[in-house]
Amino acid sequence: MRMVLALLMVLGLVVAPGAAVNAAPVAQAREHKVGYDKYSLTVDGERIMVWSGEFHYFRLPSPELWRDVLEKIRAAGFTGVSLYFHWGYHSPAPGVYDFSGVRDVERLLRMTEELGLYVIARPGPYINAETTGGGFPAWLKNVDGRARSSDPGYTAAYREWLGRINPILARHQVTRGGSVIAYNAENEYGANVDPLYMEQLQEKARADGIDVPIVHNNCCNGDLPNWSSGQGAVQIPGVDDYPQSFNCPDPGTWGTWGEGVTRRLRDDAPVYAAEYQAGAIDLNNAGYEKCRELTGPDYMKVYYKSNAIGSGATMFGYYMLYGGTSWGWLPQPNDVYTSYDYGAAITESRGLTTKYDEFKRQGYFMTTVAPLRKTDPAAAPKPSDPAVFTQARSNPDTRTQFVLVRHTDRRASSDLSTTVDWATPDGNYSVPVRVNGRDAKILVAGYDLGGQRLVWSNSEILTHVTVDGRDVAMLYGREGEQGSTVLRYSSAPDVRVLEGDVRSSFDGKDLRLDYTHSGLARGLVSGGGRPPMLLLLGTDETAARFWRMDTGAGPVLVRGTSVVRDAKMAGDKLVLRADTDAPGDVEVFAPARRLVVGGKHVETRRTPSGSLLGALPGPRAVTLPALSDWRYRAEPPAFGDTGWTVADRTTTASPIKPKTLPVLYSDDYGYHHGNVWYRGDFTAEGTEKTVSLNAITGKGGSYLVWLNGRYLGSALGGTQADSEAPVNRDPGRGDFPVPEGLLAKGKPARLSVLVTNMGHNDDWTADDTRFKQPRGLFGAVIGDAKVSWQIRGARDNDVERGPLNTGGLYGEREGWHLPGGHGRWERPPATTGPGVSWYRTDFRFDAPRDQDVSVALRFGERAGKYRVFVFVNGWNMGQYVNGGPQRDFVLPAGVLKTANSLSLAVVSTEPGPGAPVPVSLVQLGNHRTGGPLR
Ligand code: GAL
């Protein structure tokens, strides 16, 4: 490993930690040098702030919408994204890999390049992520050798995957003109570790052409093995922090899992907040709105700002920015259901929340103010009130200071006003500071803000741009709070207040502005020996109405619209792609005389602020169709005679051995996802009293049993066996009395069992016991009968929709879920028995081409014990479990087309009405986009 690194350094591909890197004009060179030192990553010698967050392409089966989400991420000021790559999503079987359609990760990487976002590439092989098998393909369950170790079987398997994904990532590295700036080896590899494996993973990456720094995300703030030194060490060890835990039912929780200040793990590498909590899994079914509250703007203010100043991190990966949908068989069953909304800043239906606004406020600051990229801890100004806590960093070159202000007791809720004695680079000042409970601010002193000198401010900096030689700066504070900003001039500048109440005084060197944060105040400062400045002073809310976009002619500011996707200068025109969710103002601060939005010229007038002001229309109302005209089809037990596989194996690779033989695990027969049917044929004795079964389905699964076509009942599937404590050799047990007279001596008999398997467990503990837990029947006893078993699961891999789309319901095998519907459908009967009932209808979705209308399928109330698999145009968009936490199933554009088919496979363990479960289409967002989302 060390040798490989040394070689790359000689080749100039990886710069030694701390070494100087030559500056090169970034815009001209296609290939760049990536380096790093204790402060930050560098590209061609320039320090960069990797302000990024996580996005899972595999949770949005619509490449057109990847761009939508990435544009929204960029619009909030993010400079990068952190991307897991999901082995199992691409590989239905050993040696088979697919990177087409919704799996076209090269397209994804090209989008990041077009948008100028850096990528932290995280290809695992293990990724966790609450996805089936933690990202492992289910066929790996049949491979000998402990997963996440250097065992040969596993090694050969993961090299197959890395041999495919690494070259793709390598092609897209910053060093080759692409976006990939770092490569994450493994994932929270802290339990049962094998340093040789960690080393070999990196050797493989280097051999496959990865030359950017290798990073790792350590769980639990550095306490477990963190790969900062010794065999298997990575160049930039990072840390995962989830300070709020996943306690969504109690969103008032504060810091259950600590202070969340990312530890420095190496002195020669930047501090990397690899996964910093930006939402939560809904472990206790509280609903994602509660998770959003748990990790809301107040938490973000206190924890993110405390982390930035506490650690000096310059690499961040907020987990998640957009969670998306664990469609098909993507969910890992223990922790999540279909929705992976995560309470993130961007909702599953791609809406922007108040968390997004807070990200934008912090992100614009973190990425505009360059001295933040190189800071050391510094003496903090002392507050006069001990209830206020301060902490500081400063840039050793510019001496710019950054001071965190918050409550000393993190949980306190009082509103405090105090002063701090601040020794700024430009002199000593007594600065008034106001801090609310569960709030924090980063105040700046000694900063060259464009052509101005900011001495200090107790308002926070949103961002600033320079337009036509004039600085435009936006500062903000909480509504109603006092604010002061001090700027330095060589002579008295002219101050003209255009809007709001701003008082100014000049003492011969300092211009002091005093104001109350309310709405949006504007002041023009000119003269005083500096270029002119427009100062915008707003509140949290007004700050969030601004968008900063880079154009070829420098950055511009836009006020209004619900998002700005892109901005370009074309001659004297500013050309925007922007959305609106309501009619309203659009104001631009740009070197422009004309404005074009969504391809249309917008009438504007020049304002006293020097901006252009116009108005934009909102979206037109859209009506969604009612779902009616349902047709029906029954799936009788173990229907059809084709497609069965004889189940007669006596050995298994699973560490959990079955209770009875033959082995009936579905994975052992190549059926890895979703429902499987079993049939067991035997010659009856006539004396059998009970059918005793065990099934391991993963949490939330169940099974239904028929004997000679008669329904015997159902039971819940088990979730553990053998090596879990307490040892359970009797998981998912169901005992079903044999009805009197159903079996006759010497007569053939048939047992039919439908097992609803859930996804596969993860392998967080790296010991196979969870991941290699079987799915399907674990044991079967019918008196003394000798049973011949057969099993039937999914037909073939659905090449378009991928290996996780389809299970082994008979209707799925026959294409009842696909457009076209295949075969004869009938009017629904008055009642249905237990088992599988299919319902189907068609509907149109006609949204105007220039509108982004977000749609979900909503389940209404109907009593009963049933679950429903939702298929839209053949795409398995999730599993509704009656009584479960999720009622809305988001249907992304791309899956949703103009003409649509909807199939519902209802698995019911009791008789029910013949009508389908009540469902309707609902609108979760409506935006005018000015053109198709592409
Ligand atoms: C981390 C893990 C992620 C995800 C997260 C919780 O431990 O690295 O993959 O599982 O926890 O959502």
Image (spheres, rainbow, N blue to C red):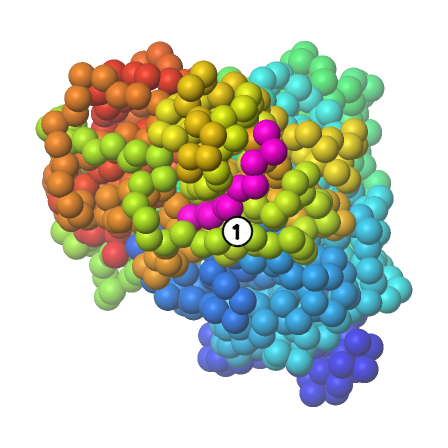
Q: Residue at x 76, y 49 (%)?
A: 767
| Image quadrant occupied by the N terminus | bottom right
Indicate whether residue 764 is drawn in magenta.
Answer: no
On the image, the x and y values in percent for residue 799 come to: 34, 61
In front of the other: 360 or 814: 814
Q: How many marks?
A: 1
Choose top left, top right, bottom left or bottom right for residue 760.
Answer: top right
Helix, strand or loop at label 1? It is: strand
Q: Is 721 on the left-hand or right-hand side of 516? A: right
The region drawn magenta spans: 783-792
- In the current view of this chain or complex, which residue is farthest to the right? 230
Q: Residue at x 63, y 23 (%)?
A: 247
In front of the other: 236 or 309: 236
Q: Is 308 on the left-hand or right-hand side of 324? A: right
Q: Is residue 47 above or below residue 283?
A: below
Indicate whether residue 784 is drawn in magenta.
Answer: yes
Q: Is residue 371 above or below residue 111?
A: above
On the image, the x and y values in percent for residue 31 come to: 53, 80
In front of the other: 652 or 570: 652
Q: Is residue 691 above or below residue 151?
A: above
On the image, the x and y values in percent for residue 781 come to: 60, 33
Observer able to see residue 447: no
**Which residue, given by chain and number where applicable, does mark 1 sit on?**
647
